[in-house]
Amino acid sequence: MLRLRRFIKAWGDRRLAVNRRLHGATDGDEARALNYWTCAISHYERYLSRVPSDIGVRVRLANTFRESGDLNSAIAVLREAMASRPEKQSLRIILAEILDEAGFTGDALELLAQTQHASNGKDESRIAVEGDQNNPPAPEYEARQVHILVNVADVSDPILNATVESLQNQDFKSWRATIWGEGANAGILNESAAKDGRFVFDAERVSDHLSGPVLIIRAGTVLRRECLGWMLWALEDGVEAVYADHEANIADKFVPVLQSSPHPLDLETNPMPPAVVLLRERVEVLGSNFLDARMCLEGALQCGTVRHVPLVLASVPTSNTVAVTSSASTEQREVGGRILVIIPTRDEGAVLDVMLTSLFERASDRGALDVVVVDNGSQDVSTLSVLDRWRQRGVETLRRDEPFNWSSLNNAACEGRPQPIVVFANNDMEMLSDGWDLEVRRLLAMDNVGVVGARLLYPNDRVQHAGIVMGGFNGEPLHEGLRVGRDERGPLDRWVRRRPATAVTGAFMAMRRSVFDQVGGFDAENFAVSCNDVDFCLRAGATGWTILYAPELVLRHHESLSRGHANTESKQQRAAEEMRRLLARWGARARFDPTRNPQWEARGIRLFAGMRSLTTEEVMDWAIKTESRPFGQLETPTLA
């Protein structure tokens, strides 16, 4: 009987494998492995129309929707699967994870409570719950006295005493604290702290006797017991300042505030700057501004090295949100001269017409634009008519009858054209920002900014691009904010504020011509179609230029209309080979992104879906790799 059951099972498995291969499920697996979600979904749905009872493929379909960012469709597919197989506990767990990821944590927990895993107390889910992250111990560091400045302005005695108790509980004991501000006196401390000789009071001004490292915090900040140890370790090697992550009370809930690596342009627009900053030496300040973390870090970034410790080392009672602007209009400097706009195209005259019209209509100075359309072998009569009409209006057409090579087409259009600003754009776009050309001039005039990328939206107004994160999906680069709603802001507003990025998409990329020449243009030999923009940004960043994501530049993008998606075997093989070359060329750098805090945990394309604990070695590695360095002093990876 046992042999018979085994034979029947083996026969069923073989039959299932044949059906999956014949009716599209295997094709779906291959497309999904290459992140071609639309293609994979189509194959899975075609298969399930023939074999609706295959729960395994139904789960693959749900996970593909999840990876593409369409959580509602993933939930619907899994609910349908559960209706047909209510006894299958694994379906409940997967559905609970996706419900939690979509923000329905209550429904997720209720669903888990119904499972056998939950009743047995096993933690089979990945649902993030509130509670302290377990911070690793600090490495060895030089023990020296730390002076702590605590601002007591506009706080109650209990809030101050919470800070005082956290100081007394520090693993590192060699510190003195100046409690500063109106009403600062021993009477506001609890009995234990009042007897602690390490506390002094200064109601009018900061003590003139500060020496050595200085930690600045506001009353109400509660430090984790390992805080001073980690901050002191990071302050070694001539570092000027150190900051760490914290958690803040937002809408009556403590939420982690996870910072990026040190950069003045990130700090400038950060709505919740670091709450805990350790300086190497005392600072000369006036009034209460000495406790402004943003000002202290700005000063440190100008004169030396700054490190970030990617650990939540403190809690603050309020979010301390600071109003910032994402507009570069306050930046008065501009890069002068004419702007060269390069747009490769092949047929698709209607969308090209939309792009050209929107560029000119929304420009603040149309007469300063030189537009070159690189015609890569258009045959469509209507497209040729569009090109001729725009040629009569001053738009140049450069004919290139050759196999599509995005890098080569753009490089060719740059040759012999001296404009100081170059904008590379796809034909399947529509500019939505008025005065975009003026914004480009101002953004590129900012210190050390060499490349600027835009915020791109799909036709349904969901986000297609808010910067590129290295190692974001299966170790490969991934667009940030992919498929989120237009109004979603992201952690620390990163999808809607101007900030440094490791890379931006070439679908709309503006740069100084000098940067293009210095880097050597796009690599047409190795990256004909894909990865060329990421490779260029990595090379520009390696020479010290800042890559800037600028959401004040907004375009609508109908992706890949001219050349089509990589939906054939040859296109998929080409894309996979170019990705392999990118990862081989850049090694570990291709999987490391200093703009995304390493405590973030990704789930599919959701790059900020949860938190993970770090080891001591991981914290040290991040702090050292991402420390700020003077412009032009960055190490250039070997380009093998």
Image: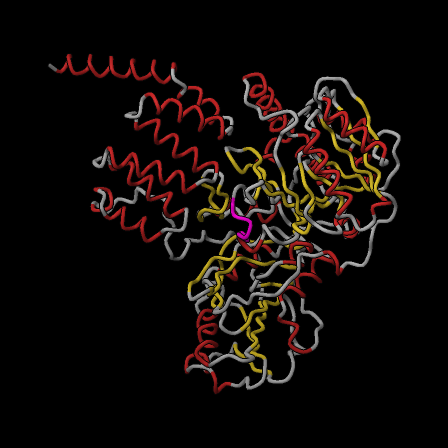
Q: Quadrant of the N terminus?
A: top left
Report the residue that reaches farthest toward the left: 1
- Residue 186 is situated, as x and y percent measured from the top left of the image, at 50, 85
What residue appears at the point 42 percent right and 63 percent down from the top-left corner? 253
| Quarter of image, res 639 | top right
Say which quarter of the image contains residue 482: top right
Q: Position of residue 84 (x, y in %)?
A: 24, 33
Q: Is residue 118 left or right of residue 232?
A: left
Q: Which residues are magenta?
A: 484-490
In the image, residue 192 lies at what x, y percent?
42, 79
Is 149 inside the magenta-drawn segment? no
135 w.r.t. 77: above or below: below
On whether residue 487 falls in the magenta region, the answer is: yes
Specify whether 471 is left or right of 537: left
Protein image colouring: secondary structure
Q: Residue at x 71, y 17 (%)?
A: 403
- Magenta-colored segment: predominant secondary structure: loop
